[in-house]
């Protein structure tokens, strides 16, 4: 009942020329039975929206303000993203938590701002290497999930996506094993099930952290892994498409 979602987080990369080439490459090779999402940097959203028009590839953003409008220099509101055609937005990416000091409360407020404008949040959760080594993984990811559930409740979570991204696997070439990832995904789903069984069954939980064509099949074949949030490999249309093809093959098997 959950379609795979293959999502690209372009981070602070791109240029007009590079974006056009990347979007065209992705459009040429999308597989059926899989939902695709690309999240370019804010200044390029409009360009990518135009380049994507007529395709089924969804458009998202990498960040959103928790504020609605006014004197918040440099911020971008959910209403603005919605007007540009964004259907998704990442919230709580570990780079924003670590480099821009975003706390759980702020992440929850961003989540709430997104859903007010019918933008589906992709809530990123994940532990650092030190936390994993201290056996704190479960507590960390559940606290990050609970911070949002506590504000929006099960009803507000409908349609949202969770991305489990172990911080130690992001951009490092290290990947969680399929079994390590599956264990955390199952835990996150069980927390949703405590609130609402239908919500747990329908919520997509993506894996993120050095997902590449070579490891995609193993990760995506796990029962609670419903797609990927992909950084580095999403900047290469061939790699991104190969990951999508791995999902499509599993979806049709
Ligand atoms: C990410 O930024 O969300 C990510 C998973 O990056 P990478 O695929 O490069 O590890």
Image (cartoon, rainbow, N blue to C red):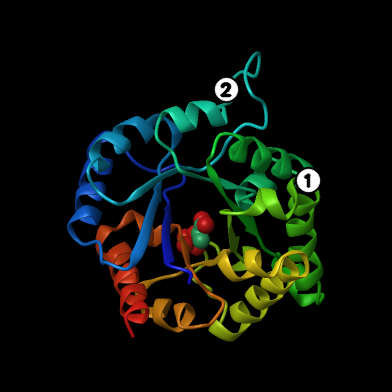
For the point 77% across and 72% down, which residue is it? 138
Does label 1 or label 2 sit earlier along the sequence? 2
Tell me: 120 left or right of 100: left
Q: Residues within 10 Å of mark 1 (few under 14, many from 20)?
A: some
Decide: is 35 above or below 96. below
Residue 31's tag is none
Q: Secondary structure at mark 1?
A: helix
**Which residue is the site of mark 1?**
151
Q: Quadrant of residue 205?
A: bottom right
Q: Residues within 10 Å of mark 2 (few under 14, many from 20)?
A: few
Marks 1 and 2 in Cβ contact (< 8 Å): no
Give percent across and percent down for residue 88. Answer: 49, 46
Circle 1 or circle 2, nearest the eye: 1
Residue 74's tag is 2
Give percent across and percent down for residue 31. Answer: 25, 66
Give percent across and percent down for residue 18. Answer: 25, 43
The C terminus lies in quadrant: bottom left
For the point 56% across and 31% down, which residue is it? 78
Residue, far top: 71
Decide: is 31 above or below 18. below
Q: Label 1, label 2: how many angstroms apart (C-alpha)?
A: 25 Å
For the point 81% across and 51% down, which residue is it? 150
Give percent across and percent down for residue 250. Answer: 36, 81
Can residue 234 be seen here? The reply is: yes
Decide: is 145 above or below 97. below
Q: Nearer the viewer, residue 133 or 25?
A: 25
For the point 76% across and 76% down, which residue is it? 133
Can residue 102 be seen here? The reply is: no
Tell me: 103 left or right of 16: right
Q: Quadrant of residue 16?
A: top left
Q: Secondary structure at mark 2?
A: loop
Count of marks overlaid on the render? 2
């Amino acid at each position: 009942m959950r379609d795979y979602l293959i999502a690209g987080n372009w981070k602070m990369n791109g240029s007009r020329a590079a974006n056009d080439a990347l979007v065209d490459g992705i459009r040429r090779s999308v597989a059926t039975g899989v939902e695709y999402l690309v999240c370019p940097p804010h200044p390029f959203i409009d360009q990518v929206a135009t380049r994507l028009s007529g395709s089924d590839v969804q458009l998202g953003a990498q960040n959103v303000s928790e504020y609605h409008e006014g004197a918040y220099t440099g911020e971008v509101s959910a209403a603005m993203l919605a007007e540009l055609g964004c259907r998704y937005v990442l919230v709580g990416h570990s780079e924003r938590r670590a480099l821009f000091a975003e706390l759980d409360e702020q992440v929850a407020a961003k989540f709430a701002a997104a859903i007010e404008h019918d933008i589906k949040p992709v809530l990123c959760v994940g532990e650092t290497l030190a936390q994993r080594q201290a056996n704190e993984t479960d507590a960390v990811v559940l606290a990050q999930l609970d911070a949002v559930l506590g504000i929006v409740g099960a009803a507000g979570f409908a349609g949202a996506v969770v991305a489990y991204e172990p911080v130690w696997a992001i951009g490092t070439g290290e990947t969680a094993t399929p079994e390590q990832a599956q264990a955390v995904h199952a835990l996150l789903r069980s927390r949703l099930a405590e609130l609402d069984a239908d919500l747990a069954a329908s919520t997509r939980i993506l894996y993120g952290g050095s997902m590449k064509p070579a490891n995609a099949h193993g990760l995506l074949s796990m029962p609670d892994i419903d797609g990927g949030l992909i950084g580095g490999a999403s900047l290469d249309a061939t790699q991104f498409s190969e990951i999508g093809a791995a999902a499509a093959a599993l979806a049709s098997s």
